[in-house]
Amino acid sequence: MEETAITLLEFSRRIGALMRSPQLQRCWIVAEAVDVTVRGGHCYLELVQKNATTNVVEAKVRAVIWANVYSRLRVAFEKATGQPLQSGMKVMVEVSANFHEQYGLSLIVSNINPTYTLGDMARQRLEIVNRLKREGIIDLNKRLPWCVAPQRIAIVSADSAAGYGDFIDQLHRNPYGLKFYTKLFSAYMQGVNTVPSVLAALRRIEQLQATFDCVVVIRGGGATAELNVFDNYELAAALARFPLPTIVGIGHDRDYTVLDEVASVRVKTPTAAAEFLIDKGQKALARLDDISQTIADITNQMLVDSRRQLDYIANTIPLAVKQIMTVSKANLSNYARSIPLCAKSRIDSSDKDLQLYLVRTRQAVEAVMNRERHRLEVFSTQVDLLSPRQVLRRGYSLVMCHGKFVTNASQLKPGDTIVTHFASGKASSNIIEIKE
């Protein structure tokens, strides 16, 4: 067994010889690029394949694009896709297997098919749109009301971009003399920093939302592939939920990004965004002109009607005064004739009433006197019945001592002189003995 054993180096060289088989050279494969780094002009990465359901890595191998090849492929790839080769991209690459005695298995990349990556980007865009629809936020910004004439504009763009300059020039040099107040929130509009910088600009605008009427996100023309950076879920969701109406003007009319799906208004270019705002302002101005003209017409008509009414009144007043005076004179004559008759009638009626009142008064007085006379007779009878003299006539007597009536023997003492009153006369007596 020892005689048939070979060294590890020999075994590795045999593996290397197998790797040089035509079946393992210049093969096109599809995978996801991860851990993409560039050092010394060479591009190092790993190619992985994940399970579509569990997202678990099922295969992984190291790969390298040598500097002389990478310099050529990088330009072609970025021109086609608008983005550099970076982690997370789905790629179709031409590779050759290579096995090094010290570094093991790796793949040497000799070509990249950017069309495959573009197709995957389109798929990702569709997935983002469907996710926004499922979450029910894709139309939120479209439902926000626009003010009649938006004039306070927050702009998200690169400060040195030609599209931004075109927008500002178009907006402020409008033929209607409309005034707009603009504020730029600078952001990267291409490359890997686009998404975080645009999100940061939107956050700054949201803090000042009461200051603005709307937000404009603009970027000038360029390669269609360069706009793929705007096919980002976080960016689209932030724009969909934004509390101010948004206008997106990115690229040309043929270009399309996910931001176009969520924006309140989608225009084809930055200048078209300016034209949209100018058009709203011009329509508001036209409505104001129409209202002003309507007010002027109504005022003129009211003045004409008022003049006619005044003329009519001026012509009618003399006739009305004459008619009123004639009627008043006739009424006065009637009053003059009717006053003596009315006075005599009132006097006669009053005389009759007075005679009636006199009769009723006499009758009432006699009735009261008779009633009071009867009461006096009753009271007199009662007084007579209750009179002390009447009591004395019935055989009773009254005893007084020292000018006071005596009602109890205890009021007297021996030697007192009492006076006894009878119905007829009185008698004096001396008290000899008292018995109680």
Image (cartoon, rainbow, N blue to C red):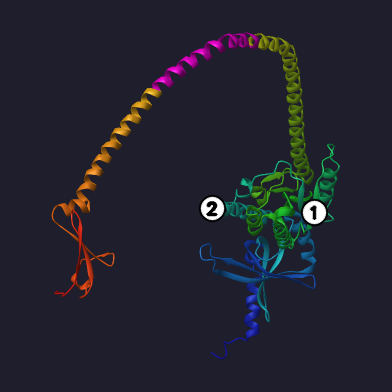
Tell me: 34 left or right of 179.
left
- Identify residue for label 2: 134
Task: For residue 314, say whether it is visible.
Answer: yes
- Identify residue for label 1: 183
Is the residue marked by circle 1 packed among few (<14), some (14-19), or many (20+) residues within 10 Å? few
Compared with 212, 74 (above or below) is below
Front one among 209 and 331: 331
Q: Amino acid at mark 2?
A: Arg
Residue 288 picture quarter: top right
Whether the magenta-drawn stretch holds residue 265 is answered as no
Which residue is pictured at 73% across the width and 33% down the height? Answer: 287
Whether the magenta-drawn stretch holds residue 335 is answered as yes
Q: Where in the figure is residue 147, as x and y percent of width and height?
A: 69, 44
Compared with 188, 21 (above or below) is below
Secondary structure that dominates the magenta span? helix
Camera-nearest label, 2 or 1: 1
Secondary structure under tag 2 reads helix
Compared with 99, 174 (above or below) is above
Secondary structure under tag 1 reads strand
Q: Where in the figure is residue 167, as x and y percent of width and height?
A: 81, 47
Tell me: 412 left or right of 220.
left
Front one among 82 and 95: 82
Q: Which residues are the magenta region?
A: 328-356
Tell me: 59 left or right of 193.
left
